[in-house]
Amino acid sequence: MKDRFDLEQQILECWNVTNDIKHVTEYVLDAPLEPNREDKISNMLIGIEELYNLKFQKLFETFEQLIAEKKVI
């Protein structure tokens, strides 16, 4: 059974997207040019997108559960 602390933790985890974007940006700006660099960057961004789709889905499911149980208003 989840509570508002689970919701808060999931919200905080979702803020990590900004750090992940920062890491990709640093790679783009600092990494030496290499073959297939565009593919590597695309794969990183696709991975971040999939990961955060899952995190936000989990977050929303927790939110819906807490609303249904009247644990948050």
Image: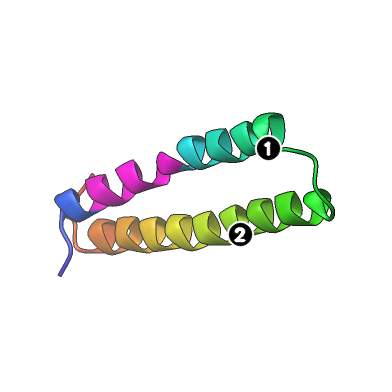
Q: Quadrant of the C terminus?
A: top left
Question: Which residue occupies 15% across, 57% down?
Answer: 3
Q: Is residue 14 magenta?
A: yes
**Viewer-proximal residue, 21 or 71?**
21
Q: Residue at x 61, y 40 (%)?
A: 24
Front residue of 13 and 37: 37
Relative placement, left or right, of 23 versus 35 is: left
Q: Pick out the residue farthest to the bottom.
A: 1
Q: Position of residue 41 (x, y in %)?
A: 72, 49
What range of the chain is rendered magenta?
A: 7-16
Residue at image position (40%, 57%) is: 60
* Numbered tag placed on residue 49 in the rendering: none
Lateral position of residue 18 relative to residue 68, left or right:
right
What amino acid is at disc 2?
Answer: Gly
Query: Which of 32/59 is in front?
Result: 32
| Earlier-in-chain disc, 2 versus 1 | 1
Left or right of 5, for residue 45: right
Name the main secondary structure of what is drawn in magenta.
helix
Report the side of 66 relative to 15 (left or right).
left
- Look at the numbered disc 2 and give the secondary structure of its residue: helix
Which residue type carries mark 1? Ala
How far apart marks 2 and 1 lie (CA) works out to 19 Å
Q: Secondary structure at mark 1?
A: loop
Q: Quadrant of the N terminus?
A: bottom left
Residue 57: where, in percent of width, then height?
Answer: 46, 61
- The residue identified by callout 1 is 31
Quarter of image, res 31: top right
Image height of 54 relative to 10, above or below: below
The verdict on residue 17 being magenta is no
Q: Which residue was labeled with disc 2?
A: 47
Colour setup of the view: rainbow
Residue shown at 70%/58% (left/top)?
43
